[in-house]
Image: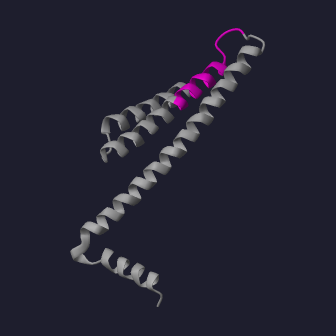
């Protein structure tokens, strides 16, 4: 067996031994941090796409013929604004998790309330 494979084998065996729980928990924590960072990068991309979509919709509405009264387009724009706010709050949740390694309950509740408010406004 090649030496590199022997080292990997010893590492895997050490990870799952009962007296080496610290090493196992450190590996789990490293995976959690990596996943949170990947989610943060994904949320940045989603937020940028949402902001671009909102800007495109606003420009499109400003350049189109004005329609009288409260139109469905206004509700669409409100929905897009709230989508951006929800994405920013989710990104803040992920950032808070990376800083404190704990889920911030207040941020989660605020994000949930914004999402529910968006649904109510759209309906």
Q: How is the image coloured?
A: one colour
- Residue 112 vs 103, above or below: the answer is above
Frontmost residue, 75 versus 35? 35
Residue 49 image point, x, y percent: 62, 36
Q: Residue at x 21, y 75 (%)?
A: 19
26 sits left or right of 92 in the view: left
The part of the chain drawn in magenta is 68-84
Residue furthest out toward the right:
65
Q: Residue at x 37, y 45 (%)?
A: 98
Q: Is 5 rendered above or below residue 110? A: below
From the image, give the main secondary structure of the stretch colored magenta: helix
Question: Left or right: where does residue 8 sit relative to residue 106?
Answer: right
State whether residue 109 is above or below residue 61.
below
Residue 86 picture location, percent across and down: 48, 33
Residue 43 visible in image:
yes
- Residue sitting at x 53%, y 25%: 121
Quadrant location of residue 64?
top right
Can residue 123 be seen here? The reply is no
Q: Position of residue 11 (x, y in %)?
A: 36, 77
Residue 79 shown in magenta: yes
Residue 63 lies in quadrant: top right
Q: Is 15 colored magenta in this rendering?
A: no
Q: Quadrant of residue 6?
A: bottom left
Give the mark count: 0
Q: Nearer the viewer, residue 113 or 49?
A: 49
Quarter of the figure with the C terminus: top right
| Residue 13 % position (x, y) | 34, 80
Outermost top residue: 68
Nearest the viewer among 25 and 64 is 25
């Amino acid at each position: 067996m090649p030496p590199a494979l022997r080292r990997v084998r010893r590492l895997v065996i050490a990870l799952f031994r009962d007296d080496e729980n610290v090493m196992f928990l450190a590996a789990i924590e490293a995976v959690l941090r990596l996943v949170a960072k990947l989610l943060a990068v994904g949320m940045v991309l989603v937020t940028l796409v949402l902001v671009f979509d909102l800007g495109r919709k606003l420009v499109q509405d400003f350049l189109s013929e004005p329609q009288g009264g409260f139109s469905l387009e206004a509700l669409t724009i409100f929905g897009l604004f709230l989508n951006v706010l929800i994405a920013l709050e989710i990104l803040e949740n992920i950032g808070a998790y990376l800083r404190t390694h704990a889920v911030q309950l207040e941020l989660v509740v605020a994000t949930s309330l914004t999402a529910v408010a968006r649904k109510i406004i759209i309906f």
